Amino acid sequence: MQFEVFSLLPEAFTSYIEASILKRAQERGLIKINIHNIRDYTYDKHHVTDDTPYGGGGGMVMKPEPVFEAIEKVLGFKHQVEVNDEAISHPTKPTVDSSIPIILLTPQGRVFNQSIAKELSQHPRLALICGRYEGIDERIRQHLVTDEISIGDYVLTGGEIPALVLIDAISRLLPNVLGDPTGAEDDSHAMGLLEYPHYTRPPEFRGSKVPDVLLSGDHAKIDKWRHEQALERTFRKRPDMLETANLSAEDKKFLEKLKEKNNS
Ligand code: ADE
């Protein structure tokens, strides 16, 4: 998987990538994260990337030219040759390889979740545009971007942290990125349920004991206990998830009993 990240704050990415599992994933050739500074695609003396909004109002708006230029240079003018020069002068025609998702990180996008992470992990290459300032020129959204993603209903100062969130969530789903080959399978959200509780040594800590079943060595019993814990946690913390989870008849019975217990 190759990530092409477009940002006005490229230094925001280095420390997290260097400190995390993403570094090893890059060294092992499992992912490649290319950070492109949008400012490098300006040609005026002061390398201006923003301007005041038409119609007035506060704040600055990201200019379209450097963002188009950066994306087109990095992703390639695939259709320029095929469609002819119109592709460059007429921005409604795709000017880049349209098979690569070009994702704008914005609070206006679809809200990111595990299933979107899985969907995006199927692509060999993704372009991520990080917005800054108060907004971006609408023509970037209209004529360049193919998808808009938000990481939640709150507003950050830019798309850099959201881009890192996507890169992290997607990368750990790719083969061999996690040390444990089953690492991502039991995750919270992976099966539509929250994850069961984990324990490690010591067996008793400040009077609090590890549940006996986990020390029993009976793996069928342990699996059943973990699954029921996942169901119960989801029921208590995120009941909304149960509406879309893939539940067996036995799961439904277990949840009915929990509901009865809860109401009595
Ligand atoms: N940029 C600013 N806030 C954001 C959010 N919540 N998600 C994605 N990009 C953003």
Image (cartoon, rainbow, N blue to C red):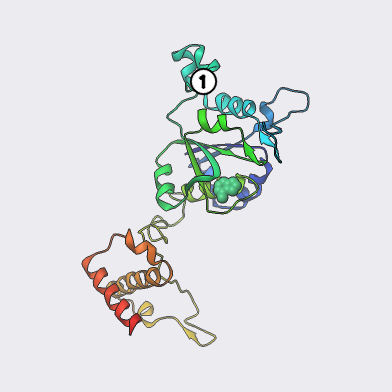
Residue neighbourhood size for the residue with mark 1, other residues' Cα within 10 Å, grouped as few (<14), some (14–19), many (≥20): some
Q: Is residue 51 left or right of residue 16?
A: right
Quadrant into which the C terminus falls = bottom left
Pointer 1 residue: 77
x, y (%) of residue 94? 47, 23
The furthest residue to the right: 45
Among the 4 quarters of the image, the one containing residue 56: top right
From the top left corner, tell me how far across and down residue 74 is, in percent. 56, 27
Does residue 159 sit above or below 48 in this rendering? below
Q: Can residue 254 be seen in this snapshot?
A: yes
**SS for tag 1?**
loop
Q: Amino acid at mark 1?
A: Phe
Pick the residue in front: 38 or 50: 50
Residue 188: give x, y in percent of width and height. Answer: 42, 61
* Front-most of residues 58 and 118: 58
- Count of numbered tags: 1
Residue furthest to the left: 249
Q: Is residue 124 above or below residue 118?
A: above
Q: Residue furthest front?
A: 55
